[in-house]
Amino acid sequence: MTLAASITSEAGRREDEVLRVRDLDVAYRVRGVDRLTLRGVDFEIGPHESFGLVGESGCGKSTTVQAITRYLPRNGRVVRGSIEIGGQDLMGMRPEALRQLRARTVSVVYQEPGRALNPSIRVGRQVAEVFEVSGVGRGEALERAEQALRTVQIADPGRVLGAYPHQLSGGMLQRVVIAMAIAVEPSLLVLDEPTTALDATVEAEVLELISGLREQFSTAVLFISHNLAVIAKMCDRVGVMYAGEIVETGPARAVFEAPHHPYTVGLLRCVPRRGQRKDHARLDTIPGFLPSPGEVPTGCIFAARCTLADDRCRSESPAMELIGETRTARCFKSAEAPNLPRAEPEEMALRSAPPSPEPVMRLEHVSKTYHVRGTAVRALVDVGLELFPGETLGVVGESGCGKTTLARVMLGLTAPDTGSVVELGGRAVPPVATSRSREDLRLLQIVFQNPDSALNRRHSVRHIVSRTLSKLAGLSGAALEDRLLEIVRSVRMEPRHLPMRPVQLSGGLKQRVAIARAFAGEPAVLVCDEPTSALDVSVQAAILNLLVDLQSRERVSYVFISHDLGVVRYLSDRIVVLYLGRVMEYGPAESVFAGPHHPYTEALLSAVPTLDGTGRERIRLAGDIPSPANPPSGCVFHTRCPRRLADGTCDTVEPPLREVQPGKVLRCHLPLEQLGRLEEAPVSA
Amino acid sequence: MLWATLAEAPEGPGGGPALKTYLLKRIGLAVLTAVLLSIIIFLAGQVLPGNPGRAVLGHTASQAAVAAFNRKLGLDRPLAVQYWSWLTGLLHGNLGISYQYQAPVSQFLWPAALKSLKLAAVAFVIVVPLSILGGVIAALNRGRAVDRIISTTGLSLSTLPEFVSGIVLIVVFAIELKVLPSTANPPQGAGLLTQLHYLILPAFPLVFVLFGYIARMTRAGTVEALESDYVRTATLKGLSRRTVIFRHTLRNSLLPTITVIATQTGYLIGGLVVTETLFNYPGLGRLIFSAAQFKDFPMLEAGILVIGVVYLVATLVADVIATLLNPRVRLQGAD
């Protein structure tokens, strides 16, 4: 198993590794029983090298980080193996030596910057502590803290130092945390999902900052992410983890271009990319489920979900095998992996619906103003949209743009301002759900982001779905029972799931129940608010396939809200881009992605890292998203717009929405020729 | 999503006007509650069975004498008028005339309240440091034997009624060991230290009741803070365990505890009936108890009102302290 030890980014063994993890087993003690969570994890990071660990939830990425920082939960312990940092054995280290190591050698940046800082201590004090630990006096430490904030490109460090964490935005907080982490110039920087909680444009900023700092300080980096594209962008080498084991390692680019392990292959196929759309092909999925924690199957850990697995795979555990000079895979059939048979048939049963001139839902002059302590906050401003039968309207934008308010207004959960019109099937419907007729409620349903909180945990699957069937579809008795089974099957669940309660189901299955419930009343419009954001990519792929199947069969229209542009592109026929509650761009999906773009759309698109790592020139956005309570004058985007007109028009005059191509509108003063295009070669079907 | 934006959006009005508005609102609310309380107490006094004149004068008194007695005390007037004169009287410091003693209530009430306050203060001074320490130690050793001992002890003690723990304490410390006096009453003209000496034993039943509660709150808050991301950040910065605990953990974990403690002062003043009776201590609790026995409504009403107001002030102080300690609330003016 120490085979990986002999492989580094250059061939041959190196003695000066910053981090060396050898054959590491970690167990958690749950109800008196040890559950093995990491098995034989083995990798090393050389000086200046950046190594990525990628995998879905439950694969052991975070446990690895916790072991490396010796911050395992109280019930976790290292059972076997060793961890060396800069040649020092971590496991045998005494508390004072460990403290010194943390103070000088290893720094960690975590996912939630808002929670990583102490809420009741000013930011300045918290940054200064890093210097005080290494013996710098209080006053000087504060000065150095200010310097550290400048290093992470915080323009006004004075204000940030004096602020409490809750007064700063997520992106700003993550800069502060990074500043603390690199302040002492550690030899190993551990980044555990550092951008997962951030918006796309902010994520791009932070990733760029990290890349820049790496060049400046030449620190070795361990980068943890579930996002393959982020790893591809940030890392020299990558290790793919599955169920507590590293199943494949190699140079990042090479692994993602030609994976050798069936799990890696499957993972890559789950993600819609290179402009893949629902009418091209179904997404492939990884069948089955992750083994439950602590369960160690005989044979290959992935065999149960692998379409290549044979008897040997199920009985004998494969060792890490060297492939070529720089790559390893834990698979007997690594040579066949690229031709992994699909788990899902490729062809879509897409029925091209005859275009209907009558929209099923129409929004006109929809505005929503919240009044917060005497300040009017305009969450939506004069939004007009049309949704046609059987089509998907993608809604994109960063947090605070009004996506969720829009969904709530459609559903009648939030009453819009007077003058707003919401029409369903050609009739204006009352603004709040409680005064809408049962028929209106039936026509418009929702799937939420988090199925955990959306499903009543006390009710069984049967109860959840049949209640909708009786209330909205008016069914009872045998008819209800038949339809119940039909719906449950159509979301690819089985009758044995019916008596189960939500806690007994996995995240993906829960979301299927939510979808089954939504479809039970045969709605005309389904609002999907980030339905796959909380799910792993393999589960996401299955849910997206399901949504597409159901749409083509039932001719239902989707309003699909997501921050993931790849997913939006895969599913949407038309797209609306929101910024500070205003429609910035609205048109057919392909034309929105092809351009010419609104400068905000352009920035959003260019911020998304791509898997092939071909770094597009990123459009930099200055500063944070302004507060909707105090939107900028003129064009609300002008404060961050890289293409703002020099004559000051953008600062003072709000541009109207104008039609620039058939069916596509933009809210921008710039002439079409001056707008950017990020044309990607569309994938051939 | 929008709420998250809004919560972040206004850059905090800087602690000035918003905080002031909040505090004024909070105080206004307390005053309103006090008024409601006074109405409820007054009405309760009216619906309680028993005629004060009859109660005071006894079975043998004539109906005319009872009526005359009631008229003399103004008990034959309409309710609203009676309430108003009672309330304005209160505001002028006139708590009415005790039926029982035929003397102003205030003559008895204030000395008794002062005595109760002393007893409560002693209990408070003992229980607060003890229970916080216990809670923090339990949290730092969560899951281990120490934690279980502290938590179980605290829970058992708080379920022990005061008359049980009080009697046990008297038997052990006053009668067997003879280290502490069995009564709470020091000899006339005793100095402060002697008074304290006499109050230690009576304070302990109260300490027992509160210890488990405060220690549990402290433990919960501390465990939550210890397992938070910011404590992880602080630890991985290489700060010493001492700094991590004192600067990063306790500052956040004691916030809810402070609120709990402040609320409990209300109980300390009001929940003394049993202890005071047991230790024969002439405090507020005993006064109210005897007033109830004698249907001495003015005394009863005034006593309950005092306890209610102490409760109100205690919760008000708790809220204000919590606000001032939490920068999030302090800088945003709290909802």
Image: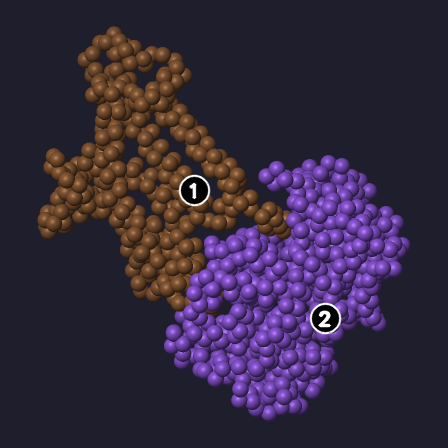
Chain colours: A purple, B brown
Residue B93 higher or lower than A533, as above or below: above
Numbered tag placed on residue A602 in the rendering? none
| Amino acid type at image mark 1 | Asp
Residue B236 percent location from the top left of the image: 47, 69
Residue at figure coordinates x 34%, y 60% from the top left: B138
For residue A392, say whether it is visible. Answer: no
Residue A46 percent location from the top left of the image: 57, 83
Residue A141 percent location from the top left of the image: 47, 64
A253 left or right of B309 in image: right
Residue A422 percent location from the top left of the image: 76, 42
Relative to the observer, which residue lies in front, A477 or B138? B138
User: Residue A5's quadrant in the figure?
Assistant: bottom right
Residue at figure coordinates x 59%, y 67% from the top left: A151
Relative to the observer, which residue lies in front, A319 or A218? A218
Which residue does the numbered mark 1 point to in the structure image?
B319
For residue B95, say whether it is visible. Answer: yes
Kind of element beneath mark 2: loop
| Amino acid type at image mark 2 | Thr
B5 left or right of A32 in image: right
Residue A447 higher or lower than B66, as above or below: below
Residue B74 higher or lower than A5, as above or below: above
User: Residue A399's quadrant in the figure?
Assistant: bottom right
Relative to the observer, which residue lies in front, B275 or A49? A49
B243 left or right of B270 in image: right
Which residue does the numbered mark 2 point to in the structure image?
A610
A282 left or right of A44 in image: right
